[in-house]
């Protein structure tokens, strides 16, 4: 049986393999990376097969996952060279479009793009997918099933992929957690209590939305009673430009993703 092969042993590969092992994924996993230390860690922690030789790694792939930084994709695919058999390849490189990937490594390779969240390590991931026209329905199902083992999966039109990428990152939650807990500490809470309060504010609210049936507007009205403390906090943040700041950050993320596309 052909293996699932990762080209690149960095953070997202570690998160994905961690989630796959947690889900009981027993198919052979092979990782290629230039850095021996990364391969040793993956072999020790997750019992993957380490492969230093790029061509040998690709030759063993039934499903190939390109998990390197966007500015490394071009050189990596050039080193892969021509693939002379049908192969499903998934790129995790943010901002690099399917058209450019296909020109770098064309038929009989069929491309998909995936953007998995690092939270896939816990089985609570969220992965966006986009497929090249050449990829068959059965291949698409295989890719969806692969990522569904580590969390929810959504198909997003590729023209909106960069916007999704800039919006969905768990870094937004971590950043908000840090900001909110820091504010609590600045006003006198100890660090542990401030983090607990901020974590509830974020995680508790999000869980109530995702697991319940009330619309977001209704939940906000429920949590922020007019004239109350929460309502004053929200009003002050909005007047300070909270929504504009968030949109500005997401726009900057989209711009960075589009800049990545010009590097290959």
Image (cartoon, rainbow, N blue to C red):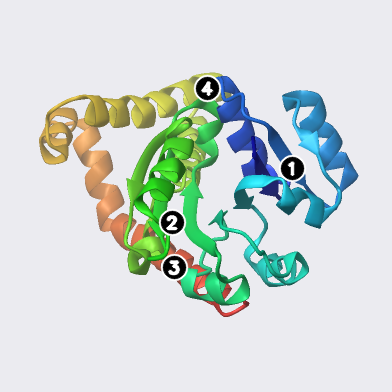
Q: Determine crowd level at label 4: few under 14, some 14-19, many 20+ residues with C-alpha closer than 10 A.
A: some
**Distance between the alpha carbons at the discs numbered 3 and 4:** 32 Å
Which residue is tagged 3?
A: 254
**Callout 3: helix, strand or loop?**
helix
Residue 211 location in percent, x, y?
Answer: 24, 25
The residue at the point 27 percent across, 49 percent down is: 236
Q: Quadrant of residue 133?
A: bottom left
Which residue is tagged 4?
A: 23
Considering only vertical position in the picture, is 86 above or below 256?
above
Disc on the earlier residue, 3 or 4: 4
**Distance between the alpha carbons at the discs numbered 1 and 3:** 29 Å
Q: Nearer the viewer, residue 199 or 227?
A: 199
Residue 226 location in percent, x, y?
Answer: 10, 35
Which residue is tagged 1?
A: 31
Which residue is tagged 2?
A: 165
Q: Are the residues at dot 1 and dot 4 in contact (C-beta closer than 8 Å)?
A: no
Disc on the earlier residue, 2 or 3: 2
């Amino acid at each position: 049986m052909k293996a699932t092969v990762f080209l690149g042993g960095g953070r997202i590969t570690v998160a994905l393999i961690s989630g796959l092992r947690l889900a009981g994924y027993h198919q052979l996993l092979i990782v290629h990376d230039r850095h021996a230390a990364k391969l040793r860690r993956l072999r020790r922690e997750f019992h993957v097969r380490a492969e230093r030789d790029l061509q040998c790694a690709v030759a063993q792939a039934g499903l190939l996952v390109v998990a390197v930084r966007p500015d490394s994709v071009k050189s990596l695919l050039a080193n892969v060279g021509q693939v002379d058999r049908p192969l499903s390849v998934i790129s995790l490189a943010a901002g690099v479009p399917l058209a450019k990937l296909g020109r770098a490594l064309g038929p009989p390779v069929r491309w998909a793009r995936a953007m998995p969240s690092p939270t896939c390590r816990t089985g609570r991931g969220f992965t966006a997918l986009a497929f090249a026209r050449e990829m068959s329905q059965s291949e698409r199902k295989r890719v969806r099933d692969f990522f569904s083992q580590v969390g929810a999966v959504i198909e997003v039109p590729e023209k909106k992929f960069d916007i999704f990428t800039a919006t969905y990152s768990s870094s937004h939650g971590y950043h908000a957690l840090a900001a909110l807990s820091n504010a609590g500490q600045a006003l006198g809470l100890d660090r542990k209590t401030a983090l607990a309060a901020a974590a509830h504010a974020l995680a508790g609210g999000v869980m109530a939305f995702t697991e319940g049936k009330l619309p977001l507007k209704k939940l906000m009205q429920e949590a922020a009673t007019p004239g109350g403390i929460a309502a004053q906090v929200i009003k002050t943040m909005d007047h300070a430009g909270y929504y504009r700041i968030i949109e500005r950050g997401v726009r900057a993320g989209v711009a960075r993703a589009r800049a990545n596309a010009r590097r290959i």
